[in-house]
Amino acid sequence: MRGGTRDGRTGGGRARWRALPRWARWTCAVYVIGFAEGSVAHWLDLARGGLHVYAAFATAPLQVFFVGLALLDPLTVVWVGRVRPAGIRLAAVVMTLDVVANWRVNWPLLVADPTWLWRPVGLLPITLFGLFVVATAVPLLRAVGEVRGRLDCASR
């Protein structure tokens, strides 16, 4: 079946990437790079400190969330890399929660020292990346939907 995949859906990952407008390919690439970096950071944290690595500064629910990012971030990489709408939605949800959680745990540090925000590693890049993901999610979902529609029509 031309343009199909093993599971019967049309347009494999490569076809979907090629069919995206250039801006959407770049946006997906930034998502993949950002979530891959987050994956590595959370896995390194877990390797260094175990499951309770975040216990010194986060409540139990936030600790569970931060540990969960070791699974959610790579899942997002795979789904966005395969140009799946679910990956874009997951990226927006994960980054919204991640930014809120990081602001929550860093708030006492920011109150004590407002320059804490401007450190190159930590809250500032997480916040900027989160804003980028949330701001681009809807246009990216539209672009992915248009590509899927074109690929579905082309395979018939």
Image: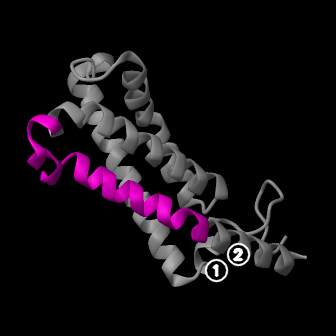
- The stretch drawn in magenta includes residue 130: yes
Task: Locate the N terminus by quadrant.
Answer: bottom right
For image coordinates 14% across by 54% down, the residue present is 118
Residue to which mark 1 is pinned? 19
User: In the orientation shown, which residue stands out farthest toward the right?
Assistant: 156
**x%, y% of residue 54?**
27, 23
For image coordinates 15% across by 37% down, the residue present is 111
Foreground of the two, 141 or 128: 128
Q: Which amino acid does label 2 sit on?
A: Val
**x%, y% of residue 148?**
74, 70
Q: What's the magenta region?
A: 111-140
Splitting the image into 4 quarters, where does residue 66 fall? top left
Predominant secondary structure, magenta span: helix
- The stretch drawn in magenta includes residue 90: no
For image coordinates 36% across by 58% down, the residue present is 129
- Label 1: how many Cα within 10 Å (few below 14, some 14–19, many 20+): some
Residue to which mark 2 is pinned? 147
Please, is residue 128 above or below residue 90 in the view? below
Cβ atoms under marks 1 and 2 closer than 8 Å: yes
